[in-house]
Image (tube, rainbow, N blue to C red):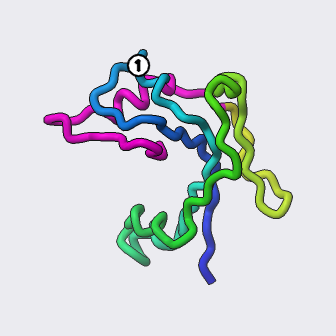
Amino acid sequence: MLTYYPKGELVIVTRNSVRSVKPEQAVSNILGYTIGNDLTARMFQSPDVAGGQFTYAKAFDKFAPMGPRLVHPSKFDASASKLQTRVNGKTLQDSPLDFIFPVGELISFLSQGELNCMFLVSCELT
């Protein structure tokens, strides 16, 4: 039987395609926010079982469920929110959304790249 580890994540959905966007411009490219469940099959992260391959451990079908709602940026304040992950009524995660970097800086960073090679397309999930 495959055992997995769930972890809640805030998902940022972009409105427009962006490349090399400045942090102050990035926020206007947010279509909305939703939640995601970052599932991991821990047994495939073990060096003894699968060589410690993190990508494979997160790449199974249905391992990134999201939703069910998309919340407009004007209706959501990440700094005043928290994220809870529950499985069968048991709370596994209950934490504030305390970012090291503001959302605009994250989008800006992801839209950068050597030789302008990083490009976030419209409706990209970050």
Q: In the rendered view, does 9 fall on the left or right side of 118?
A: right
Extreme residue toward the bottom, this view? 1
Q: Nearer the viewer, residue 43 or 15?
A: 15
Residue that mark 1 sits on: 25
Disc 1 residue type (three-letter): Gln
Q: Nearer the viewer, residue 84 or 64?
A: 64
Q: Magenta part of the protein: which range? A: 97-126
Q: In the rendered view, does 30 fall on the left or right side of 35?
A: left
24 versus 53 height, above or below: above
Give the secondary structure at mark 1. helix
Q: Classify 10 Å Cα crowding around label 1: few (below 14), some (14-19), many (20 and above).
A: some
Q: Looking at the image, which residue is at 29% across and 32% down?
A: 19
Quadrant where the N terminus lies?
Answer: bottom right
State which quadrant residue 11 falls in. Answer: top right
Q: In the rendered view, does 86 fall on the left or right side of 96?
A: right
95 versus 73 height, above or below: below
Q: Looking at the image, which residue is at 67% across and 36% down?
A: 71
Q: Looking at the image, which residue is at 56% across and 60% down?
A: 64
Q: In the rendered structure, does residue 120 fall within the stretch colored magenta?
A: yes
39 versus 110 height, above or below: below
Majority secondary structure in the magenta region: loop
Extreme residue toward the top, this view? 24
Q: Position of residue 18 (x, y in %)?
A: 34, 33
Q: Position of residue 20 (x, y in %)?
A: 28, 28
Residue 101 seen from this side: no
Q: Looking at the image, which residue is at 85% across and 58% down?
A: 89
Q: Position of residue 39 (x, y in %)?
A: 58, 61
State which quadrant residue 79 falls in. Answer: top right
Residue 18 seen from this side: yes
